Amino acid sequence: MSTPENEEAAFIAKITASTTHEIRNVLAIVRESAGLIGDMVRAFEKRGTINREGMTKAVDRIDAQVGRGAEIVSNLNRLAHSLDNPQQELNLSQEVRQAAFLCRRFAQRKKQTVQVVCEDDGQQTVAGPLHLQMALCWGIECCLEQLPEGGTLLIRTSRHEDRPALDFVFDTAGSPGTADPAGANRWMDLTQTAGNLGAVVETADPACHFRLRLPRSGGA
């Protein structure tokens, strides 16, 4: 029988596997670019001329990948530290952006995009950081499963009944998506995790495919 601890471990393992795969890609590109620089240096030693444009492009590529790698590690480290505090006040925009980043590789499998639209970057909620990330990632996964290939998932911060909320909306090349996220494999995981957070999952509003209403912060 599954326990909350097993579910947490499985979630962290899944995200870690995905992010470490991205890190391997970063290292492979850095290694390839470094190899090109080495080839150009050896060519310079033989001919006394250097491909400045090629050298610049290779260095720029390494710089870009170092930045990408640092962002991946930063997000993974932040997820690891989500275990430090079982309950705290959290910035909703920051949390949903992190979840979108962690789920980016899952979206890329079907050439999908996850976009976050934050109307209020200062909106707060009170929750366990790990469980909030679990709920957000399960919500994203439910949508990606039902979203057509090449589609975009929009996640908008909002406020409903005086509670911070997130609206999950499909954008399929200008046509509204008709798929139902509630039919996805992770839907039960989403609703159970949301319930543990004191959050509410709503599907009745025609303006979005579903809404996640979260607990108010202490100061709200």
Image (spheres, grey):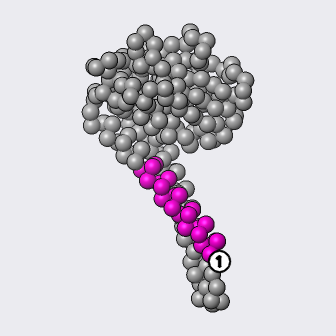
Quadrant holding the C terminus: top left
x, y percent for residue 160: 46, 13
Q: Is residue 58 above or below residue 115?
A: below
Bounds of the magenta segment: 52-73
Residue 164, percent from left and from top = 41, 19
Q: In this rendered view, identify the residue nearer to me: 110 or 174.
A: 174
Q: x%, y% of residue 182?
A: 57, 18
Q: Residue at x 54, y 27 (%)?
A: 155
Instruction: Name the side, left or right, on which 46 lies relative to 17.
Output: right
Is 87 a magenta residue?
no
Can residue 188 be seen from the camera position used here?
A: no
Q: Residue 56 lies in magenta, yes or no?
A: yes
Q: Quadrant of residue 135?
A: top left
Give the image quarter of residue 107. top right
Q: Main secondary structure of the magenta part?
A: helix
Residue under pointer 1: 51
Tell me how many marks there are.
1
* Relative image position of residue 158 (x, y in whole percent): 48, 20
Mark 1, residues whose alpha carbon is within 10 Å: few (<14), some, or many (≥20)?
few
- Quadrant containing the N terminus is top left
Q: Amino acid at mark 1?
A: Asn
